Image (spheres, rainbow, N blue to C red):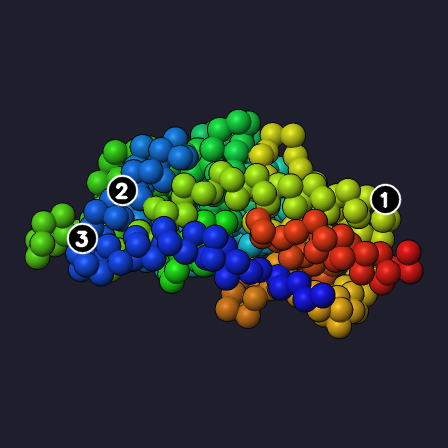
């Protein structure tokens, strides 16, 4: 049996007519950049996350930049960022000229450890970035409290966490700004590059509107600096169609996760991802850990699954503090041990809404076989 890590074709087939007609509509109207489809999507997406403003942008990475830029983060500032995340989380602050300060993750949620934030705060710290990694929200209450006590901004990176919840409230409205990715493989994926920035703050919203579009609220009147970070019309149209299916797809992902739990229960050689009581996990990724044997054993398991037609992923093999691009910051191996251990032992299993029970059982059986069970 062949099990891809992700299958975008099967999802497209299930909504082909709706998607094709939405794209045709953009072609007929030639509304290729922003326009009605994007505006409708922005409003629907804001509603879905209970947040006041949403701006469709050109990618999640650009959304990260805007989320920092709109808060005035700049040269000489420091921004606290989890070490266990995708590199784009760090570009936001870095592109604004600020220094990223990396903090370790919790061993159960794999999200930024609130207890390790305070020690990283200096007189230069301006913001904390909380990433809701793999689809599970970071523990926001203690983070918000630290932000308040120290007069810091909170930025949420929700790239992997569409419709994810913290204490029964959707993510994306807890921070001063939040950014989302609609990279095709995300829980809500465009058919190209796309992202969004959300905020509940009217002043920040005003800035975001300009920053996304050359600093101009009126064509050729550039009141502030800006850039071309606009969402394309076709992406807005595709996302508008797909958003209507997202709740159903999210529940399907949660069912896939519970099937994995059922089949892999009691297998001591692996650690299953924890679902924290405050979170509604949306399972962008299902990341297990090898209990013993480190990266060598993990890599053997990857090869064994591959031989059996199963594709897997590593999220992420090198934590940000050990990436070459940040070598000047002087971090060393051993500085952030929880993130480093996860990088060595972690393995992402296939995860998408259409994954069948037969496929999940097949994957689980092969994992058990690898461990001689
Ligand atoms: C946590 C995180 N932040 C930011 C991004 C950047 O999003 P994009 O790929 O849309 O630029 C991603 C995408 O992989 C991500 O996973």
Q: Is mark 3 within 8 Å of ligand 1?
A: no
Q: Nearer the N terminus, badge 2 or badge 3?
A: 2
> Between 117 and 349, which is closer to the camera in this rendering?
349
Q: Residues within 10 Å of mark 3 (few under 14, many from 20)?
A: many
Cα–Cα gap, marks 1 and 2: 47 Å
**Label 1: which secondary element:** loop
Residues at badges 3 and 1 in contact (C-beta under 8 Å)?
A: no
What kind of element bears circle 3?
loop
Depicted 229 relative to depicted 266: above or below: below
Whether residue 290 appears in this view of the structure is no
- Is any part of residue 217 visible from this angle? yes
Give the residue number, with chain letter if any, for mark 3.
Answer: 215
Where is residue 231? Give x, y as percent: 29, 55
> Whole-Å distance between the Cαs marked 3 and 1?
56 Å
Q: Residue furthest top?
A: 168
**Ligand 1 is within 8 Å of the C-beta of the residue at disc 1:** no
Name the residue tied to disc 1.
266
Q: Is residue 276 above or below residue 24?
A: above
Residue drawn at x 85%, y 53% as measured from the top left: 269
Depth check: give the residue in front, 238 or 17. 17
**Residue 40 circle label:** 2
């Amino acid at each position: 049996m062949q099990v891809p890590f992700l299958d975008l074709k099967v999802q497209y087939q299930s909504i082909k007519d709706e998607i094709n007609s939405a794209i045709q509509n953009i072609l007929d109207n030639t509304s290729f950049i922003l326009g009605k489809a994007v505006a409708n999507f922005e409003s629907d997406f804001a509603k879905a996350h209970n947040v006041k403003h949403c701006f469709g942008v050109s990618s999640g990475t650009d959304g990260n930049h805007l989320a920092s830029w709109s808060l005035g983060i700049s040269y000489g500032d420091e921004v606290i960022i989890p070490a266990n995340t995708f590199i784009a989380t760090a570009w936001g602050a870095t592109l604004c000229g600020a220094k990223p300060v990396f903090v370790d993750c919790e061993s159960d949620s794999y999200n930024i450890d609130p207890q390790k934030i305070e020690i990283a705060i200096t007189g230069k710290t301006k913001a904390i970035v909380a990433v809701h990694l793999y689809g599970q929200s970071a523990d926001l209450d203690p983070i918000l409290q630290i932000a308040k006590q120290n007069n810091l901004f909170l930025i949420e990176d929700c790239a992997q966490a569409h419709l994810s919840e913290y204490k029964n409230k959707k993510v994306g409205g807890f921070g001063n700004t939040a950014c989302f990715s609609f990279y095709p493989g995300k829980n809500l994926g465009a058919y190209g590059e796309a992202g969004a920035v959300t905020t509940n703050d009217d002043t920040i919203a005003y800035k975001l509107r300009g920053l996304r579009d050359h600093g101009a609220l009126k064509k050729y009147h550039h009141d502030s600096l800006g850039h071309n970070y606009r969402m394309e019309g076709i992406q807005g149209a595709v996302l508008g169609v797909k958003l209507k299916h997202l709740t159903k797809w999210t529940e399907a992902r949660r069912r896939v996760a519970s099937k994995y739990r059922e089949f892999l229960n009691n297998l001591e050689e692996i650690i299953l991802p924890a679902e924290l009581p405050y979170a509604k996990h949306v399972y962008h990724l299902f990341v297990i850990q090898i209990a013993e044997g480190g990266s060598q054993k993990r890599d053997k398991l990857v090869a064994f699954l591959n031989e059996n037609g199963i594709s897997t992923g590593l999220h992420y093999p090198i934590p940000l503090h050990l990436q070459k691009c940040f070598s000047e910051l002087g971090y060393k191996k051993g500085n952030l041990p929880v993130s480093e251990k996860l990088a060595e032992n972690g393995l992402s299993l296939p995860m998408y809404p259409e994954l069948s029970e037969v496929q999940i059982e097949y994957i689980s059986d092969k994992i058990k076989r690898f461990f001689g069970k």
